[in-house]
Image (cartoon, rainbow, N blue to C red):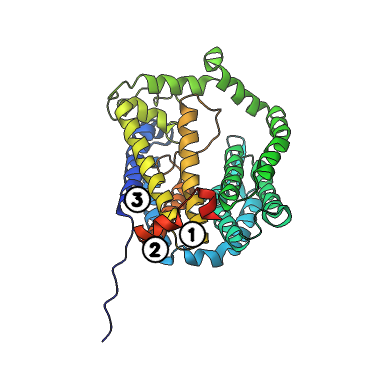
Amino acid sequence: MKAASSPVRFDALLLGAVLSLVSLGLVMVYSASAVMAQEKLGDSLYFLTRQMVAAGLGVVAMAVGMKVGWRKLARLAYPLLLVTLVLLVLVLIPGIGTTAGGARRWIRLPGFSLQPAEVAKFAWVVYLSYSLAKKREKVATFSVGFLPHLMLCGLLVGLCMLQPDFGSSVLLVFLLFALLFAAGARLSYLVGSVLLALPLAYAAVASSPYRMKRILAFLDPWAHRHDIGYQVAESLMSIGSGGLTGLGLGDGRQKLFFLPEAHTDFIFAIIGEELGLMGVLLLVILYGVVIWRGIRASMAAPETFGTYLGLGLTSIIAFQATVNMCVAMGLLPTKGLTLPFVSYGGTSLVVLMGAAGVLLSLSASSLPVSNRASRTGGDMREVAA
């Protein structure tokens, strides 16, 4: 007699937090974009409709991520990386890549636009996790564990900078160092490479007028209130006017052609204005749950590849959320990174929901609590290595 199959297990708390963020994002995208969409496009539902389609595709991507499972991604590490490199090259070709806002970051396809840099983040984590797990006995060596990964990261960053996409470039480098640290790479290599990269980072900023403007706007947005600091100043005004409970959903004023990119990079400011401190705290709590459960699933993974993969995917969400909120509050220079699951952006939403599906599949294979304690004893570097 055939035994009944065991029910599929997954982290319901993680799933609930992700779906709550997506739902909040749909509401806020409509609130932040309706007036602008009606005025410029003649359809107040334009951005909401497109985001809802992306959310639907994201649910499919999440289901696929759960069904395929994290283990099978190891076999896709090289194909995903190859496809990503091809897309990053194609987007730079005139006629294939589309330019908007001075950057060539999108490939127009029938009915939607694909942003290769968003795909690159996911593919980079999968490849790094597979490579570091395979080479974990030699991760501490320079020629095997450090240099090849650094060179490949340089290639990806170089292609992103040609668009240019400084925010995604910084995230790719952050993911490299975070996973190398977790895998047990020598701190001397990590710190030394950072020190060597500082002059290059300075040159990249100093040689670009628009990046220098962003730095000046960050240092003193009010001194450039009507110029380069306009966006940051409007964002701060938006958040500050929300108070404890906000002006009310839909009653924000800065989205009325005062705050640029209100439904994309600066949607956090609209949340602060319309939902107030309570809405911001809810948002932070939801991200905290996603990060907590993602790390929990990672540390309980039965294989090293799963540990690295979970940490990498969780790091994408944590890094983007932190940077986006800090930018909106004037704590960091503008980077162009979206607020995960919330900001308008089809490729970002689909990829992140797919990543959440992988985290859910990882949570389904977590070790029992008794075994988890023994596996996760000591610091993260010992566990991951």
Q: Is residue 271 left or right of residue 332?
A: left
Q: Nearer the viewer, mark 2 or mark 3?
A: 2
Which residue lies at the image location 65% right of the left edge and 25% below the top edge?
212
The numbered disc on residue 171 is: none
Residue at image mark 3: 14
Q: Is residue 150 left or right of residue 55?
A: right
Q: Residue furthest top?
A: 223
Q: Is residue 345 left or right of residue 167?
A: left
Which residue lies at the image location 55% right of the left edge and 12% below the top edge?
223
Q: Tell me, yes or no, whether the two marked residues, 1 and 2, touch with CB atoms within 8 Å.
A: yes
Question: What crowding class fits label 2: few (fewer than 14 Cα within 10 Å), some (14-19), or many (20 or more)?
Answer: some
If you read the primary sequence from the N terminus, does the residue marked by circle 2 or circle 3 appear first? Answer: 3
Please, what secondary structure does the residue beneath circle 3 have?
helix
In the rendered image, the vertical position of residue 313 relative to residue 285, given as above or below:
below
Query: Closer to the camera, 102 or 312?
Result: 312
Task: Locate residue 353, reporting x and y percent.
Answer: 42, 52
Residue at image mark 1: 306
The numbered disc on residue 365 is: 2
Query: Closer to the camera, 87 or 179?
Result: 179
